[in-house]
């Protein structure tokens, strides 16, 4: 018997080891796309996206603040976020995020007529609800002012939306600075209050989940740990001891609440303070029990996977760890981010399927300057009527051209010429002035009917539209705008005497029959140039109207160099993406 004791002890040790919860473990990370805010040592913030399966990270180029708010659309894969300028931005696809220089090319910034503090999607994924400096608003994305409607309640501290059933959790301050939390559901003509969780002096986080369940977290000075509530049920405390809650979120199925919080036990001295290291907890909504998940010291924020199987936790300033509920494994995520970047606001793309990714090219290629944009086709929220002349950008497939030449422009005569004074037509209300001749170029402002401008240069054919460089008469601001769509003109010439243009009108078209080919195939690159002195394709002199067959083996950018009459020059490029057979 004695000789068998060491073996039995070894077996018992191995068995106990396998039962220990939460050790770091070599496990494959789940598929999924994450978005989060990263802030460097200088306080400059950016939004990043992470493909968990591959570890690739991309960056959005729209400026944001460290407090930027993020929200995925569950229906059409669009991420909305608040921007540094008081507007909001949309990430409409992952084009460019995981290629070459890893900059997301399909983003747009919108500057509405109010300061945006928070944005969230309403059910159906077509309408946004905003917390603004003027109260709660709702509109379709990129709406004009008269498509924006006020909402019948106040949420000065923020809101959370859940679509099943459609319910809003609203936090608003009372006259002495306490925070009241109310839930609302839409009625026939306005939102109707469902129930109240209560009023608290120190709310730090809140969320609403499936079946109108709600939760609030508080600071230690409130003397409690936060409250969980469901319709027709009295709110109950999350724990019978104090927790300073930093972040919390319902699982998508509503069965559990993940909580990042610090307790007096975790501080070592029995006293809670703002900034104490937090740990991870799970609250079961059915039983009302709270369980600590060991191993997550210095947790700061979290988000659930769409299938409720995983929790991603931010630890310290930049460590991401995935916790698998079924196995209790902790899997660190390897990130390739600049040093000293602090991560906050993680949010997991809310579908099981990974967003479509473009295959990485064989060699790093800069993002094309005139890459096509992807735009979702939005329909208005049913409680108000959309502006009748709103025309959305045509929906396209990522990687395919928006149009060829200027085929999205009106088929009539070109409405203006270089040197003309032009103005915005009634059809052109809220036409967008951009930093370059492309739908993906930065939005500078929207122009009202009658806005006058000087036409400086053009026209350029890009993404199917006919673009002009203009200078706004009132402000002197210079930018680019498209002159029309297939239905009519957005700008027109003002019939006043104009100085003779110093150069003939310049017209340049550059496009390809196929922008994406399979390795071993070929395509035709075509150009049509007028009003120039000389033109070169890939360094070789060519005639103004011509074409050339190209058969690249890797993704390649082809350049057309144009010499104007006054010997100044510029270039246009087209990129052919080569996919593996």
Image (cartoon, rainbow, N blue to C red):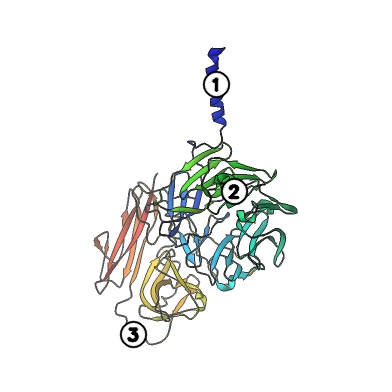
Mark closest to the chain's N terminus, 2 or 3: 2
Residue 214 vs 133, above or below: the answer is above
Query: Label 1 near label 3: C-beta < 8 Å?
Result: no
How packed is label 1: few (under 14 Cα within 10 Å), some, or many (20 or more)? Answer: few
Q: Callout 3: helix, strand or loop?
A: loop
Left or right: where 339 falls relative to 84: left
Residue lying furthest bottom: 497
Q: Position of residue 59 (x, y in %)?
A: 43, 55
Tag shown at residue 259: 2
Numbered disc 1: secondary structure: helix
Residue topped by disc 1: 9
Pointer 3 residue: 499
Q: Out of 247 and 331, give the one closest to the viewer.
A: 247
Q: Quadrant of the N terminus?
A: top right
- The percent position of residue 51, horizontal first and vertical second, equals 47, 48
Q: Say whether disc 2 or disc 1 marks the residue closer to the N-terminus.
A: 1
Mark 2 residue crowding within 10 angstroms, few (<14) / some (14–19) / many (20+): many
**How far is mark 3 from mark 1, CA to CA?**
98 Å
Q: Residue at x 37, y 87 (%)?
A: 497
In which quarter of the view is residue 9 placed? Answer: top right
- Measure how far apart labels 2 and 1 are at the Cα level: 38 Å
| Secondary element at tag 2 | strand
Which tag is nearer the camera, tag 2 or tag 3? Answer: 2
Residue 339 coordinates in the image, percent (x, y)? 39, 51
Judge from the rendering whether residue 561 lies leftward or rightward of residue 385; answer left or right.
Answer: left
Q: Earlier in the sequence, mark 3 or mark 1?
A: 1
Which dot, 3 or 1, sits closer to the camera? 1
Give coordinates of residue 402: x percent, y percent: 44, 61
Distance from Cα at disc 2 to Cα at disc 3: 68 Å
């Amino acid at each position: 018997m004695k000789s068998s004791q060491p073996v039995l002890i070894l077996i018992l040790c191995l068995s106990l080891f396998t039962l220990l919860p939460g050790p770091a473990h070599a496990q494959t990370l789940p598929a999924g796309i994450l978005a989060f805010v990263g802030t460097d040592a200088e306080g400059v913030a950016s939004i990043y996206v992470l493909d968990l399966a591959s570890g690739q990270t991309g960056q959005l180029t729209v400026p944001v603040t460290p407090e930027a708010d993020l929200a995925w659309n569950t229906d059409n894969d669009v991420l909305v976020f608040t921007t540094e300028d008081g507007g909001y931005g949309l990430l409409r696809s992952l084009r460019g995020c995981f290629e070459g220089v890893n900059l997301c090319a399909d983003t747009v910034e919108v500057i509405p007529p109010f300061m945006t503090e928070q944005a969230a999607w309403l059910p159906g994924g077509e309408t946004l609800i905003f917390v603004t400096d003027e109260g709660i608003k709702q509109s379709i994305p990129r709406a004009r002012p008269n498509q924006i409607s006020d909402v019948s309640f106040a949420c000065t501290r923020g809101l959370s939306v859940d679509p099943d059933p459609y319910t809003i959790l609203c936090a608003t301050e009372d006259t002495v600075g306490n925070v009241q939390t109310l839930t609302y559901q839409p009625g026939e003509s306005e939102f109707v209050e469902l129930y109240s969780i209560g009023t608290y002096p120190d709310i730090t986080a809140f969320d609403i989940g499936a079946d109108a369940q709600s939760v609030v977290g508080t600071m230690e000075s409130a003397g409690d740990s936060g409250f969980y509530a469901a319709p027709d049920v009295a709110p109950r405390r999350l724990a019978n001891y104090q927790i300073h809650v930093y972040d919390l979120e319902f699982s998508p199925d509503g069965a559990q609440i993940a909580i990042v919080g610090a307790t007096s036990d975790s501080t070592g001295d029995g006293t809670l303070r703002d900034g104490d290291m937090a740990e991870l907890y799970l609250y079961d909504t059915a039983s009302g029990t709270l369980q600590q998940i060991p191993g997550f010291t210095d947790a700061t924020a979290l988000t659930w996977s769409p299938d409720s199987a995983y929790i991603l936790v931010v630890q310290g300033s930049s460590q991401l760890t995935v916790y698998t509920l079924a196995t209790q494994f902790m899997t660190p995520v390897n990130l390739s981010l600049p040093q000293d970047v602090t991560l906050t606001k993680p949010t997991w793309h809310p579908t099981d399927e990974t967003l479509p990714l473009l295959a990485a090219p064989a060699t790093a290629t800069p993002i094309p300057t005139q890459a096509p944009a992807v735009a979702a086709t939005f329909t208005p929220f049913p409680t108000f009527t959309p502006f009748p002349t709103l025309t959305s950008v045509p929906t396209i497939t990522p990687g395919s051209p928006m149009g060829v030449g200027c085929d999205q422009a009106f088929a009539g005569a070109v409405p203006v010429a270089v040197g003309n004074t032009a103005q915005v037509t009634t059809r052109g209300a809220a036409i967008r002035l951009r930093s370059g001749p492309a739908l993906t170029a930065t939005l500078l402002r929207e122009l009202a009917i009658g806005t006058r401008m000087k036409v400086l240069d053009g026209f350029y054919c890009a993404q199917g539209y006919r673009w002009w460089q203009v200078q706004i008469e009132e402000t002197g601001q210079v930018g680019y705008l498209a002159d029309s769509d297939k239905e009519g003109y957005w700008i027109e010439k003002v019939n006043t005497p104009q100085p003779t243009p110093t150069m003939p009108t310049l017209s340049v078209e550059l496009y390809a029959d196929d922008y994406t080919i399979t390795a071993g195939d070929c395509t035709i690159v075509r150009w049509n140039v007028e009003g120039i002195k000389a033109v070169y394709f890939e360094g070789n002199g060519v005639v103004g109207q011509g074409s050339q067959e190209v058969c690249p083996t890797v993704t390649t950018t082809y350049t057309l160099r144009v010499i104007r009459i006054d010997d100044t020059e510029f270039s246009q490029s087209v990129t052919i993406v080569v996919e593996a057979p």
